[in-house]
Image (tube, rainbow, N blue to C red):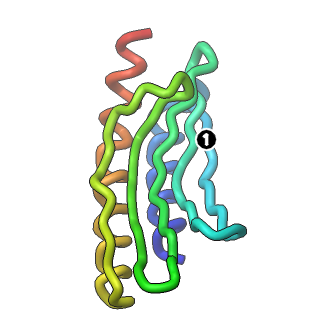
Amino acid sequence: MRAARRFEEVRQAIHADYYPHVGGEVVSDLTGRVVRVGLELRLPGGVEMVFTVTLDPGPDVFVLAGDVTLDDGEMLLALPQVETARVDACMTILERYVDEIASPARWYVTERLERL
């Protein structure tokens, strides 16, 4: 899956820049009704930062969303929920949302580390 591969690239780049201070793993939850792919990062002090894109394949419509959150529930970025009935549009939105969530990951990590 391209989405998981993109998050793995981001994980590797962050690992290269911030090892041993930041660890993480790619999350791809393909079980259950809602598919979730993303990246969970562990920062110093036990802070977790989670980058997630979800896809809910309903009976008549695909529902996509994306966000970046901290483990305390603080929302750093929330992409609007989008609905489409077309598979091709769903895949286009999925790729765009993965990029919009993954691209600023290094900035979010840097910004949070400067606060610690």
Q: Quadrant of the N terminus?
A: bottom right
On screen, residue 23 versus residue 87, left or right, reads: right
What residue sits 30% from the left and 66% below the top?
Answer: 82
Question: Can you give x and y, in whole percent of width and height, for residue 115 in the image?
Answer: 37, 11
Looking at the image, residue 35 lies above or below residue 23 = below
Q: Nearer the viewer, residue 72 or 95?
A: 72
What residue sits 35% from the left and 52% below the top?
Answer: 101
Which element carries disc 1, helix, strand or loop?
A: strand
On screen, residue 75 versus residue 20, left or right, reads: left
Question: Can you give x and y, in whole percent of width and height, for residue 37 in the image?
Answer: 54, 61
Q: Quadrant of the C terminus?
A: top left
Looking at the image, residue 6 lies above or below residue 111 = below
Q: Image quarter for residue 35? A: bottom right
What residue sits 34% from the left and 33% below the top?
Answer: 76
Question: Can you give x and y, in whole percent of width and height, for residue 20 in the image?
Answer: 60, 28
Question: Can you give x and y, in whole percent of width and height, for residue 26 in the image?
Answer: 60, 54
On screen, residue 105 versus residue 37, left or right, reads: left
Looking at the image, residue 94 lies above or below residue 98 = below
Mark 1 lies on residue: 24
Circle 1: is it few (<14), some (14-19), or many (20+) Cα within 10 Å?
some
Looking at the image, residue 6 lies above or below residue 20 = below
Kind of residue at disc 1: Gly
